Image (spheres, rainbow, N blue to C red):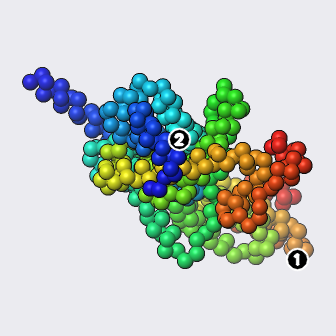
Amino acid sequence: MNSHPDQRATISAELSAGHLTPDQIDDHLIGDLAAAPAAHLLACSLCAERVALARSPLASFQQVSTAWSERHSATLPIPVPSERPSWQRHTAWATATLSMALGFAFINATHQFSILNTPQPAPVASTSTQLTPVQQSLVAPKAPALTETASIAPSPRAARISADNHTLRAIDASLDPSTDSPAALGLLPAAAPNPGPSAPLQD
Amino acid sequence: MQLALDASIANVPATERTASELDDMDTLVRTYRPRLLRFVAFSVGDADLAESITQDCFLKAYNARDRFRGDCSISTWLTSIAVNLIRDQQRLQKFRFWRQARATAIDITDAANFLPSPESSPESRLLVKEKAAQVYAALQNLSPNQRSVFLMRFSEELELSEIAAITNIPVNTVKTHLHRALKSVRTQVRAAQTATPDDARNPKPRRRARNQQPTTPPASPESIASHPAGETL
């Protein structure tokens, strides 16, 4: 190190007076000061002041850098991987999988049920075009009983449908201009299973 | 017998505490992140890069928590991981053909606005800000090793033996690095402090004179006197 002659003179004066040299001040800041200079530092207020002066910029820097890092740590989001307990994660996964499986099973069951209950073509009748509204209602997915099913296991709804069909047939027959004679209408009671409701229409 | 029992009781919880502290990532990050971020940020001089390295550091620590033997503090262990990551980063930067400009460089004057001391006067805050800026500017001229060791000692307040353990170099080498770094920083800070009043009078010529050899003569006293506003700056 090439030091200035004035500096060398100052250092030698400090040494002769027993004060700390700049290197010893550095040693003190680093934490490696020998015992004798340390003892002098405790007794000498001038050296203590010089050490404080040397420490001041470092302390300021530490203060500012700490404030900066604390501010950043407080304001920025912490990108930490979520550390949930494993049982929670497993439970969440199991619940999600079960829900999906149940959903698929429900959809599949609904599909199978609708295939089983697909309406067969209605019995061909001469008045099939006029029966269209009733058969469309039978094709609807919520219709539990269809024509064939009703014949196997008759239900009140199937009976009502058959009665409606009969009524419609009777209406068609009554409106058909080809059937002029009442004798032609007399055929209907023989074909209808429940002639009761159609009686008023025949009049 | 009682002594042996006490010793075992005293030893086991410490290990368990360390292990549980490393397992609890949230607490670990909350406790050590500010210190680690400070060290990394002022080592690399880039806020975004420091964020990334700090994050990597915690990730590495969490993944390697089983290998932590407990022969040093967690802070020391984390700092050693950070030192390795910074070294890797510096190596990467050295071999990179073109170096990206530091768009997110730390602005120390901006950082000084976060000083949490409402009771201090504006003058003292300004003084602290100036001194911190001078040290930060001096840090830029240190070698990576010197800067790292300097920050560990004067920012993180680690002991010499801890610094030696972290950096894997002998204590005497640490002392040498510290001496050189401290001397350089003190010289630069002193130069900045003596230059500051002249800078205030006539900032531009003096700043040019500091960076390069003066090509124009300094402003004459007459020219300074003809701009009385310059006196007040």
The residue lying toward the viewer, choosing from A38 and A77, is A38
Q: Which structural element holds mark 2?
A: helix
Which residue is denoted by mark 1 in the rendering? Answer: A178
Q: Which structural element holds mark 1?
A: loop
User: Residue at the top extreme?
Assistant: B2
Which residue is denoted by mark 2 in the rendering? Answer: A58
Q: So how many labels did they put on this image?
A: 2
Residue A6 visible in image: yes
- The chain carrying label 2 is A
User: Residue at the left extreme?
Assistant: B1
State the image quarter where residue B17 is shown: top left
Q: Residues within 10 Å of mark 1 (few under 14, many from 20)?
A: few
The C terminus of chain A lies in which quarter of the figure? bottom right
Considering only order in the chain, which callout, 2 or 1, is on the residue closer to the N terminus?
2
Residue at the (44%, 53%) spot, across then down: B180
B42 left or right of A181 in image: left
Labels 1, 2: front one: 2
Q: Position of residue B217 (x, y in %)?
A: 77, 61
The N terminus of chain A lies in which quarter of the figure? bottom left
The residue lying toward the viewer, choosing from A53 and A18, is A18
B102 left or right of B163 in image: right
Residue at the (66%, 54%) spot, across then down: A157
- The chain carrying label 1 is A
Q: Residues within 10 Å of mark 2 (few under 14, many from 20)?
A: many
Q: Is residue B83 above or below residue B225?
A: below
Residue B26 visible in image: no
State the image quarter where residue B91 is shown: bottom left
Residue at the (83%, 64%) spot, across then down: A171
Residue at the (66%, 62%) spot, across then down: B211
Q: Position of residue A112 (x, y in %)?
A: 53, 65
The residue lying toward the viewer, choosing from B46 and B189, is B189
Q: Position of residue B154 (x, y in %)?
A: 47, 43
